[in-house]
Amino acid sequence: MAPDFFQKIALLVSKPSELFRQVKGPENGGFWKTFLFLMTIVMVSGILSGFSGFLYGGGYSSFSPIAFIASNLAVLLYSSVVLIVLSKLFLGKNGWKETFKAVAYSSAIPIFIQALPIGQISTFLLPINLLAFGYSVVLLAKGLIILNELSLGKAIGAIIVFVLFTLGIFAFLLFGVLIPSIRGIF
């Protein structure tokens, strides 16, 4: 039986491998249960983000929760699509729903920490966001290993290719699009 929302959060922190084993397969938390879990995390985090923006001011507007939610959903969609393709290329045995579960559950903690006031301050002062990102990479590897039945090497390979592909897109956008367009303005 798949755990409920708060049990999933506790397992993500304490026993992530057990969580991934419990949600494996369509009968133990299919796509919609995973999506509902993810949307709950993103919505609560978006509200917290808006609240902390109100408390701390600084460049946050009243649209901050909407921007937070939209940007996190866009990143999760991108990550899911790319990792679904990479999982297939690295011979993952299960389908796109299992890859989505790995991405969704591994992203929950960093999304939540981003929204906390300490998370926003830590972008400049503390390493909390980097620790959350590192932990999400470990969770993603565990999720790919358990849910897609990839070996450790193939899971790490898929993550490395994902990171390099993403950095390549950022480099192209920065050096191929943004900087030349800024030069054209000035």
Image: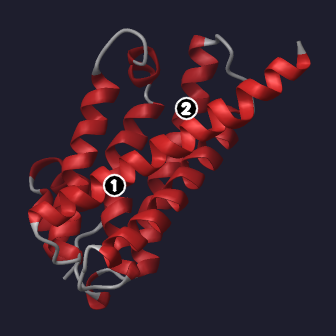
* Local SS, label 1: helix
**Circle on res. 49:** 2
**Residue at x 68%, y 36% (from the top left corner):** 176
Q: Is residue 55 above or below residue 151?
A: above
Q: Position of residue 147 (x, y in %)?
A: 22, 75
**Residue at x 45%, y 21% (from the top left corner):** 117
- Outermost right residue: 185
Q: Is residue 146 above or below residue 44?
A: below
Q: Position of residue 83 (x, y in %)?
A: 39, 65
| Residue 47 seen from this side | no
Q: Is residue 42 above or below residue 113?
A: below
Total numbered labels placed on residues in the image: 2
Question: Mark 2: which amino acid?
Answer: Ser
Q: For mark 1, what is the residue?
A: 161
Quadrant (top left, top right, bottom left, bottom right) of the N terminus: bottom left
Q: Residues within 10 Å of mark 1 (few under 14, many from 20)?
A: some
Q: Quadrant of residue 156?
A: bottom left
Quadrant (top left, top right, bottom left, bottom right) of the C terminus: top right
* Local SS, label 2: helix
Apparent side of residue 180 relative to residue 49 in the rendered image (left or right): right
**Residue at x 42%, y 42% (from the top left corner):** 111
Task: Estimate the spatial distance between the alpha carbons at disc 2 and disc 1, rounded to whole Å.
Answer: 31 Å
Q: Position of residue 46 (x, y in %)?
A: 56, 41
* 2 or 1: tag closer to the N-terminus: 2
Question: Mark 1: which amino acid?
Answer: Val
Q: Nearer the viewer, residue 120 or 9?
A: 120
**Circle on res. 177:** none
